Amino acid sequence: MKTCKLVLVSLLFLASCQNQHTSDPASDLEDLLEEHNAVGLSVVMVKEGKIVYSDAFGMKNLEAETPLRTDDLFRIASISKSFSVTALMQLIEAGEISLDDDISDLVGFKVRNPHYPDTVITLRMMLSHTSSITDEHGYFTLDQINPDANPDWQESYNDYEPGTEYEYCNLAFNMIGAVIEKLTDTRFDQYIKAQVLDPLNLEGHFNVNELEADRLTPLYHYDSDTGTYQESPNAYASRGEEINDYTLGYSAPIFSPTGGLKISAIDLAIYMIMHMNYGQYDGERMISEESARAMQTPVLEESGYGLALRTFEEVLPGKTLVGHTGSAYGLYSAMAFDPEEKYGFVAITNGSPTEYVNGVNETLLEAIRILHQEFIE
């Protein structure tokens, strides 16, 4: 348990209470949790590039009636994608690869849209969801798109030319996990830990077997027919058996590079600060400013999506934020920041019946607006 980190956050929070505001958002956030019938809510507020507030509300475990804590770990779903791209940017800066490389050469089998066989599908297209690859028939194994393993591989492509349109694609990012393994000769989960998590002193992992079970926050799916929550049993399923039969450079999807990172809201906020500072945190540079800006800049303007980071135009009216959201097994997560004004938000719930509004789950959207009103307006 990161006692020092928690003490630091607490001191920062007390300082912010004394110097920056007179009211406390906790009451409003508690009311929000009750109003939306959410299970639990963890929030972090960053201002001027520093954590100024963090808190947790509601339940971590409904059956055990365990309250949620600020250092509890969540499977954060699709925000995980940016961790893979951060590692890739390091490899690009080292001259190992290029964003314009043919993904076929990187992943080890032919990746071509059968409708446009002469159009190269690049790494940039994969990272910006413009590859024309589709999740429609599944994305949990590379066999789905590998011509050597699946006679129906053509079904994994849309009928538009790669690079011309946007469609969100998890399969592309599970393929990216395999690419990282081929480039580094290191298992995906271990590489991300060594190159991204450890340098930032973050406690988290793509491999659930490397984490303490009691630190993991159960995720709850809301049944609208019965108005009740059911725990999602597969959210933290062991990968022991799959690891025993692991093929380096191909089995990476078992760790879900597209959405399988487990981390706390506080540590996710530290990672967010690094991107807010264009690749730098606490005097250490993780990626270059050029790489960070490339991640934050939409590839197709109409999509708003860069390289595993996207822009939000309507989360805060009149403001453009950068970040990502996630949803899986009942969980909803949001990371959104302003890289120029140096403020940002992390909000995660382990169960909420609300829908997406302006690109963010409604419970989290309102939490972000409460924090913005309290600390920024």
Image (cartoon, grey):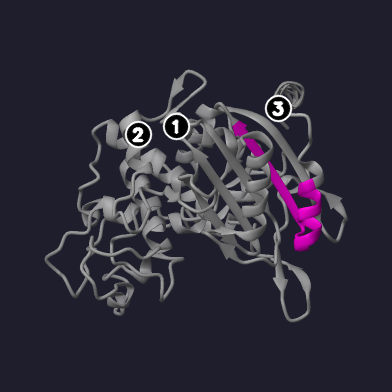
Q: Amino acid at mark 3?
A: Val
What is the x, y in percent for residue 287?
A: 38, 30
Q: Secondary structure at mark 1?
A: loop
**Mark number displayed over residue 274:** none
Give the secondary structure at mark 2. Answer: helix
Q: Where does the image place residue 28, in percent across and percent down from the top left?
A: 78, 47
Pointer 2 local density, CA inside 10 Å: few below 14, some 14–19, many at least 20: some
- The stretch of residues the image draws in magenta is 28-46
Q: Position of residue 185 (x, y in %)?
A: 36, 42
Marks 3 and 1, how far apart at CA: 23 Å
184 or 273: nearer the eye?
273
Q: Nearer the viewer, mark 1 or mark 2?
A: 1
Q: Is residue 263 left or right of residue 214?
A: left
- Disc 2 marks a residue whose amino acid type is Gln
Q: Nearer the viewer, residue 180 or 321?
A: 321
Membership of 29 in magenta stretch: yes
Against 348, residue 282 (above or below) is above
The three-letter amino acid code for the residue at tag 1 is Glu
Q: Is 353 on the left-hand or right-hand side of 272?
A: right
The label nearer to you, 2 versus 3, is: 3
Q: Are marks 1 and 2 in contact (CB under 8 Å)?
A: no
First along the sequence among labels 2 and 3: 3
Residue drawn 36% across and 52% down? Answer: 176
Q: Is residue 299 left or right of residue 214?
A: left
Q: Is label 3 or label 1 in front?
A: 1
